[in-house]
Amino acid sequence: MSITVPTTDSATPTPTRSLVEIRRVRKSFGAHEVLRDVSLAVPEGTVTVLLGPSGSGKSTLLRCINHLETIDGGRIIVDGELIGYRQVGHTIHEMTPKQIARQRRDIGMVFQRFNLFPHMTALENIVEAPTGIGGVPRTQARTRAKDLLDRVGIADFAAHYPAQLSGGQQQRVAIARALAMDPKLMLFDEPTSALDPELVGDVLDVMRELAKEGMTMIVVTHEIGFARGVADQVVFMDGGVVVEAGHPEEVLDRPQRQRTRNFLESVR
Amino acid sequence: MTLQGRGEGEGEGRGHGLGQGLLAGPSANAAAPDATDGDVVAIPLRRPWRWISAAVVLLLVAAFAFSVLTNPNIDFAAIGEFLFDPRILEGVWLTVVITVIAMVVSTVLAIVIAAMRLSSNPVLSTVAWCYVWVFRGTPLLVQIVLWGYLGLLYAKLSVGVPFTDVVFWQVNTNELISAFVAGLLALTLNQAAYSSEIVRAGMVSVDEGQHEAAYSLGMSPLYTFRRVLLPQAMRVIIPPMGNETISMLKNTSLLSVIAVLEIYTQATVISSQNLKQVELLIVASLWYLFMTSVLSIPQYYLERRYGRGTSRNLPPTPLQRMRRAFAARRPGPAPAPETKAVSVV
């Protein structure tokens, strides 16, 4: 896999095609501005880690990428398609829920609190979307689901309900569930924050494996070690703006801004 | 330390155990071991009042049963005679029909009202709130009589475009609204108000993260509702709905005020002829008891069905429990040989 090194100025074109392009996105909750003109490009097949203190807007940005949050301005483009909106002249209009659902099939998401469907077994969790909305035949989906469970290292737990699994196992089922829709892009919203420390490694290993296979990933995390080892690009956000972005060594070891330095001091 | 360690392992076991290990110190050593150390039998507290209270209650129950069974004023032969009287059986059938129709229609209506109430549209949610307010805030008996009098209020019912003269279909109210239909309407509309609150509670009980997970997989709102939210809400909805079904079955007796021939009305009609009021009330009560008992069976299995995944192990069904009890009576494999193992802490 060729690793492209985006420069700190994300506006300059990168050697490979950008799978995700975020242009001057604005978002407020009431009077509180969560995202202020955020721009970011994620080249295909790379891993971008979003770092920042809580309330910096990194989770909101992630949730805007699959339109779990609406935006107030700007544009988010995934694989050449405007997400959640149609452009008419200088304004963009929100799509219908059905159209948005169609776009979300190509974007997998993994949540901090796993959010597995508690009334379904691990296997049923994975099979539900491909058979129910993807039109994949049941037997084929089940074979694929078993492969995925094997890949994330919990093949023996296919018939278990989420309540019977540890946090680490649940999160790996959640990753397998997202992968079952063959997404072009995977979003991870603090995937290890709700886990016991000894279970974090298993989940990070699965994510490392995924990155190695060339999956485009955007990861919100506090795991600096993961960012250093896996990320092609580290983006530091604070107060709703991108403070600094670049190669992990640049941002993590030679941060230019005082705010980045303070944050890295506090998490170390 | 395990019990098997008692005897030979005593000296060795003591001090290695976690408890003693922690307590080991001057004070623990000071307690001198006495002769009974090692085979102390623990005797639970005796509770004589349990026996006394049970005896008193049994005595009272027996006295009541005796007084009923030996009462010369109750004609037990009449109870047996009328229990399967064709009129009573017709009444039972009508009661069941009304209960089923009213519960099914009211549940559909309740889902609509709950969805309106939860909608972000202020008009829909206010209308839903008012519906619940009116139908829950007035007595069912009053509503039943009111629906019975609908013909006085609107002589004709018509389907057309509101506020215009366009009418597609028209009928005399008294032709359409028989006592049966009026009763059904009253029970259904009243029940929908209660059920909608139950459905709403069920929907609210599902975690917000479930919507997000479903949406992120590309599920539409309707698909999410059907496959993800509703099955989880059902777990919360079913127990109170079981209660509601049982009260609906009993509330059908209120329809006697508008002369719907369900079981209670049938019983009173018969007793007004033969003057065996108590006997016929007992007949009706036996049928009510039988029907409500039968209703609790599907509720049990529905609860089990929707309880999947919430507890780590589902409790066995009565049938499974019975099988296991029989299996336990059969001589099982020989018990494992005793070991002298001392668990290592």
Image (cartoon, helix red, strand yellow):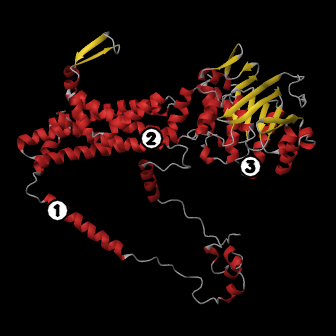
Pointer 2 residue: B237
Quadrant position of the C terminus of chain B in the picture: bottom right
Q: Is residue A148 visible?
A: no
Q: Give residue A38's position: percent from left, percent from top.
A: 78, 30
Check the residue under mark 2 and report the chain it is in: B
Whole-angstrom CA distance, mark 3 to mark 2, is 35 Å
- Amino acid type at image mark 1: Phe
Pointer 3 residue: A199
Check the residue under mark 1 and report the chain it is in: B
Other-residue count near label 3 (Cα within 10 Å), few / some / many at <14 / 14–19 / ≥20? some
In front of the other: A194 or B200: B200
- Amino acid type at image mark 2: Ile
In front of the other: A256 or B168: A256
Q: Give residue B78's position: percent from left, percent from top.
A: 10, 47
Quadrant position of the N terminus of chain B in the picture: bottom right
Pointer 1 residue: B66
In front of the other: A107 or B92: A107
For mark 1, give the secondary structure: helix
Q: Give residue A157's position: percent from left, percent from top.
A: 65, 43
What residue is at 54 percent from the left and 40 percent from the top?
B206
